[in-house]
C-alpha cells in the first residue's frame, strides 16, 4: 500500500476498529495455547475485542498462524491483517548463546549472523516481529536479566545492538526471511535499585544520557522498527507514562518514528505504581506519552472510546498510534501477503539445519571465557578424563528465555565429548545435585523444587572414585537456568553449597580439576578459583553447547572469549564495573590507609574484570605509538601497537582500546572502551594492530549538558583487558 491508501484506510476505520489495532493479546485467550510470559488475568477480553485485536504475541508455527490469520482477517471490517510477535531472544529452534555469552565473543558480526539465521527460522514459522534485542546496560549481577544483555559497557552494547537489529531486519523487513526487531526496554530497565526485579531506577539525567541511552540510540540508527517501554519508574515516573522520555527524548531527540509497544501489562500497572489513579487515567497518560500498543492489558480497549468521545483525549493521538501500526504492517508487506513467510516446508528445511547448527557451534565456542588455566587445558584425547557434575548430561542449556526451542535437540556435554573421544578416555557421573536441598522458587514456567530434581548425590562415591582414577577431572557446575532471566533476581550470587562441597571433595582426590560453569550472570567464584586449576565460563551455550565445550576442552577450538561484565569479588561489591570514577581519594593500594575509597574487608577490584579472558597461548604488547601527539576535529590520529604471540599455538587476541579524559568539565571515567579488534596471531608471530582515534570518540555531556569534546589531554590504554596499563598520552586541540 502507498501512503495515500494507508491514509484512506485510516479514514475508513471506525473508532472501535482503530482502538483495537492498539491491543496486543496472548494467544492463550484464543483457542490456541500460547506461551505466557507474564501475569495472566483470565477472561479480561470480550470475544469482539479478541476478534479485532491488532496483534498477537506468544504463539508460533506456520500452520497455526495461517489459521489465526484466516479466522481473524475475516472478522476485521477492513481486512487489516494481524501482526504476530514473540520473544525470540537468542534463537528460535536453533539456539545460540544467551546474549551475555554473545557479548563475550566481542564479535558483533557473529551475532548479526546468528540474528539473521534466527530471523529465517522465525519468519518461516509465521513470526513478523521479535522482542529483541534487549540492550539494557547492566552492572548489577543480582538482577536476573543481565543474561539477556551484552553487558556492562556502553560501546560494546551499542555495537551488538546495531548488529542484531541489522541481522533480524536486513535491508527491508518485507524481504523473505526477515523480521522486525523491537529494542527494549526503554529506558534504563537494567539498573533496578538493589538488583531487585521491576524496582525503580534512579539515575541522573547525565548518567542516563552518557551511559544508558546510547545502546538504544544505536538500535534506532540501525533502523529498529519497534521500541518496548520498560516496566520500572525512571525519575519516579513509570516509563509507559513518561511523556518527556517517550516524546521529547525517544522521538524528538533520538529520532525514533516507529511503533512504541508497552511491556506486558505495563500500562495497567501504572495504577500499582501509584501514578495513575484508575484505568481511565492510565489510558490517557500512556496515549499522551505516545505508547502505540497496549500489550496484554485492556486499558486502551476499555477506556479510550469514552476518553475520545468526551474530548478528554484528542482523536489525533489515536490516529497517530494507528498510523504507525498500519505503517509497520505495510512495511512487513502484510496487506499484500498476510502470511508473510510462513511455510511448513521452509520450517522443515531451516529448523536446526546444518548451516545453523555449525553457526551455533561457532558462536558458542567463541562465547566461552577461560578465566584460569594452570596447565590442564587443553585435555589430551588419549588421556582419561572424568566428567562430573550436574550438567554433564543436561540438554536444557539454552537459557531461560528460549521458549520455542526443543531442548532435546541440544547436544549435552557427554554427547559432545563422546563425539570427539572414545569412551575409553572419558567417563561420566554427575555425583552432585544442581540445587541445594530445600531449594524452591518460582521458575519462568512453574515452580522449581530441588525435591523434584534428579538426586545425583547418591552416586557421589562412584564419581569420586572416577576422579581418583583419571588424569584430569572436568567438573560441570552452574546455576539453574531459571535462576536468571526475568523475575530471577537473587541476593547472593553464589553457587549452591552442594556444588562447592563436591568441588572440594573432588579436588581432595584429584587436584587436576577444570570447572566448566553454566551461568546466566557473573557469580562469586572465590571458592571455585581457590580449588579449581581451570575455569571455563560457558554461560548457556545453546543447541550446540556440548560440541562447542568439547571443541574448546580438547583444543580443537582455541578459547577467545572476553568478559562482557565484571565478575564481582563478592555480592557486597555490586555494582562493580571497570569504567568507574577516580573519586577524590582513590585507593591505589596504599597499605593501611584509612582515608581512601576502599573497603575494610575486601579488595576494590572484581575477581575478574571486564574484557578479561585467557587462551591457550600468551600474548605480549609493545608500547602503543601515536602518529601525532595531538588531534583535531578534522585530523584524527592513528594509534598502533605490536602484539606478540609468545606461546606455542595460534590464537585470537581481542585487542582493546580504552581512552581516559584526564580533566574535564565533569568527572570522567578512569577509562572507557572505544574500540576493539579480534586478531588471529600465529604462534611466535607478531601483528601490528592499528586504531584511529577521532574527535568524535572524545565527546561527552559536559557541564552544560551539551554532547561535545573539549580540548585537553587524554590517555589511550591498549591491551587484553580493562586493567591494562599499556598507555600513551595525546591531546585534543
Ligand atoms: C515480558 C518481558 C519482555 C517481553 C514481554 C513479552 O514481561 O519484560 O522483555 O518481551 O514481556 O513477553
Image (cartoon, rainbow, N blue to C red):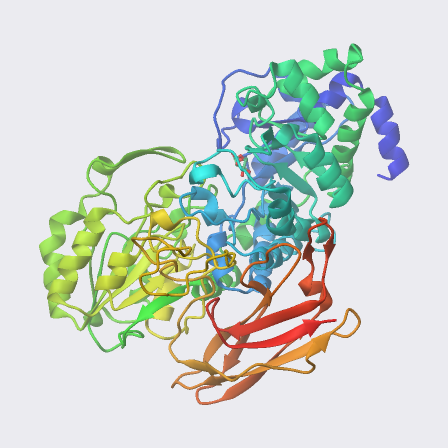
What residue do we see at 69% from left, 60% from top?
A: 699
Quarter of the figure with the N terminus: top right
Residue 274 visible? yes
Q: Relative to 466, is 75 above or below?
A: above
- State the residue lying farthest toward the right: 4
Of the pair 95 and 513, the residue shown nearer to us: 513
Q: Relative to 372, is 664 above or below?
A: above
Residue 291 visible? no
Instruction: Tell me residue 420's x, y (percent).
Output: 32, 70
- State the residue lying farthest toward the bottom: 684
What residue do we see at 38% from left, 50% from top?
A: 573
User: In the figure, is residue 340 to the left or right of 491?
Assistant: right
User: In the figure, is residue 402 to the left or right of 690?
Assistant: left
Q: Relative to 574, is 646 above or below?
A: below
What residue do we see at 63% from left, 54% from top?
A: 666
Of the pair 503 and 15, the residue shown nearer to us: 503
Question: Residue 264 appears in which quarter of the rendering?
Answer: top right
What residue do we see at 35% from left, 47% from top?
A: 572
Of the pair 154 and 466, the residue shown nearer to us: 154
User: In the figure, is residue 710 to the left or right of 607?
Assistant: right
Quarter of the figure with the C terminus: bottom right
Instruction: Tell me residue 91's x, y (percent).
Output: 51, 50
Q: Relative to 22, is 676 above or below?
A: below
Instruction: Tell me residue 680's x, y (percent).
Output: 51, 79
User: In the figure, is residue 90 to the left or right of 161?
Assistant: left
Amino acid at each position: 500500500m502507498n501512503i495515500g491508501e494507508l491514509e484512506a484506510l485510516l479514514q475508513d476505520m471506525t473508532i472501535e476498529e482503530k482502538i483495537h489495532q492498539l491491543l496486543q493479546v496472548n494467544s492463550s485467550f484464543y483457542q490456541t495455547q500460547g506461551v505466557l510470559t507474564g501475569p495472566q488475568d483470565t477472561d479480561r477480553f470480550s470475544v469482539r475485542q479478541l476478534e479485532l485485536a491488532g496483534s498477537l504475541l506468544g504463539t508460533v508455527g506456520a500452520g497455526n498462524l495461517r489459521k489465526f490469520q484466516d479466522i481473524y482477517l475475516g472478522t476485521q471490517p477492513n481486512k487489516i491483517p494481524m501482526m504476530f510477535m514473540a520473544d525470540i531472544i537468542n534463537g528460535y529452534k536453533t539456539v545460540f548463546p544467551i546474549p551475555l555469552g554473545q557479548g563475550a565473543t566481542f564479535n558483533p558480526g557473529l551475532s548479526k549472523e546468528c540474528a539473521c539465521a534466527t530471523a529465517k527460522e522465525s519468519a518461516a514459522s509465521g513470526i513478523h516481529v521479535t522482542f529483541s534485542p534487549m540492550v539494557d546496560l547492566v552492572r548489577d549481577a543480582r538482577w536476573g536479566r543481565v543474561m539477556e544483555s551484552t553487558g556492562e559497557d556502553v560501546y560494546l552494547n551499542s555495537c551488538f545492538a546495531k548488529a542484531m537489529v541489522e541481522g533480524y531486519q536486513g535491508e527491508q523487513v518485507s524481504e523473505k526471511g526477515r523480521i522486525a526487531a523491537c529494542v527494549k526496554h526503554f529506558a534504563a530497565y537494567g539498573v533496578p535499585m538493589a538488583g531487585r526485579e521491576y524496582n525503580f531506577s534512579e539515575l541522573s539525567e547525565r548518567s542516563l544520557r552518557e551511559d544508558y541511552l546510547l545502546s538504544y540510540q544505536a538500535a534506532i540508527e540501525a533502523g529498529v522498527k519497534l521500541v518496548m517501554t520498560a516496566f520500572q519508574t525512571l525519575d519516579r515516573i513509570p516509563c509507559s507514562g513518561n511523556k518527556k522520555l517517550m516524546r521529547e527524548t525517544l522521538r524528538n531527540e533520538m529520532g525514533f518514528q516507529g511503533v512504541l509497544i508497552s511491556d506486558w501489562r505495563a500500562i495497567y500497572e501504572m495504577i500499582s505504581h501509584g501514578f495513575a489513579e484508575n484505568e481511565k487515567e492510565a489510558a490517557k497518560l500512556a496515549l499522551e506519552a505516545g505508547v502505540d500498543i497496549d500489550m496484554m492489558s485492556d486499558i486502551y480497549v476499555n477506556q479510550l472510546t469514552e476518553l475520545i468521545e468526551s474530548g478528554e483525549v484528542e482523536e489525533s493521538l489515536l490516529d497517530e498510534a494507528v498510523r504507525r501500526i498500519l505503517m509497520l504492517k505495510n512495511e512487513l508487506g502484510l496487506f499484500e501477503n498476510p502470511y508473510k513467510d510462513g511455510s511448513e516446508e521452509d520450517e522443515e528445511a531451516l529448523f536446526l539445519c546444518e548451516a545453523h547448527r555449525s553457526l551455533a557451534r561457532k558462536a558458542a565456542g567463541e562465547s566461552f571465557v577461560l578465566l584460569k588455566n594452570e596447565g590442564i587445558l587443553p585435555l589430551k584425547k588419549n588421556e582419561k578424563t572424568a566428567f562430573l557434575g550436574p550438567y554433564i548430561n543436561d540438554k536444557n542449556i539454552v537459557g531461560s528465555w528460549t521458549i520455542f526451542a526443543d531442548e532435546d535437540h541440544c547436544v549435552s556435554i557427554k554427547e559432545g565429548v563422546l563425539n570427539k573421544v572414545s569412551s575409553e578416555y572419558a567417563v561420566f557421573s554427575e555425583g552432585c545435585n544442581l540445587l541445594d536441598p530445600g531449594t524452591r522458587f518460582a521458575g519462568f514456567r512453574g515452580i522449581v523444587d530441588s525435591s523434584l530434581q534428579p538426586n545425583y548425590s547418591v552416586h557421589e562415591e562412584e564419581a569420586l572414585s572416577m576422579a581418583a582414577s583419571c588424569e584430569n577431572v572436568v567438573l560441570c557446575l552452574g546455576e539453574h537456568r531459571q535462576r536468571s532471566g526475568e523475575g530471577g533476581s537473587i541476593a547472593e550470587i553464589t553457587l549452591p553449597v552442594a556444588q562447592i562441597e563436591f568441588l572440594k571433595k573432588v579436588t581432595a582426590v584429584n587436584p587436576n580439576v577444570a570447572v566448566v560453569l553454566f551461568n546466566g550472570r557473573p557469580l562469586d567464584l572465590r571458592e571455585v578459583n581457590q580449588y579449581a586449576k581451570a575455569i571455563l565460563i560457558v554461560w548457556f551455550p545453546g543447541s550446540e553447547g556440548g560440541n562447542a565445550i568439547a571443541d574448546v576442552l580438547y583444543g580443537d577450538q582455541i578459547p577467545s572469549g572476553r568478559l562482557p561484565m565484571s565478575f564481582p569479588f563478592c555480592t557486597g561489591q555490586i555494582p562493580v564495573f571497570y569504567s568507574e570514577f577516580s573519586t577524590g581519594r582513590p585507593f591505589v593500594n596504599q597499605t593501611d590507609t584509612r582515608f581512601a575509597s576502599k573497603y575494610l574487608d575486601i579488595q576494590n577490584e572484581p575477581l575478574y574484570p571486564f574484557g578479561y579472558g585467557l587462551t591457550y597461548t600468551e600474548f605480549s604488547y609493545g608500547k602503543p605509538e601515536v602518529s601525532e601527539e595531538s588531534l583535531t576535529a578534522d585530523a584524527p590520529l592513528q594509534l598502533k601497537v605490536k602484539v606478540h604471540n609468545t606461546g606455542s599455538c595460534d590464537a585470537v587476541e581481542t585487542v582493546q582500546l580504552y581512552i581516559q579524559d584526564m580533566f574535564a568539565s565533569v568527572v570522567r571515567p578512569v577509562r572507557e572502551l572505544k574500540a576493539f579488534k579480534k586478531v588471529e596471531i600465529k604462534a611466535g608471530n607478531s601483528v601490528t594492530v592499528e586504531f584511529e582515534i577521532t574527535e568524535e570518540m572524545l565527546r561527552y555531556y559536559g557541564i552544560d549538558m551539551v554532547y561535545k569534546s573539549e580540548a585537553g589531554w587524554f590517555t589511550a590504554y591498549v591491551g587484553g583487558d580493562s586493567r591494562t596499563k599499556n598507555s600513551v598520552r595525546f591531546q585534543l586541540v
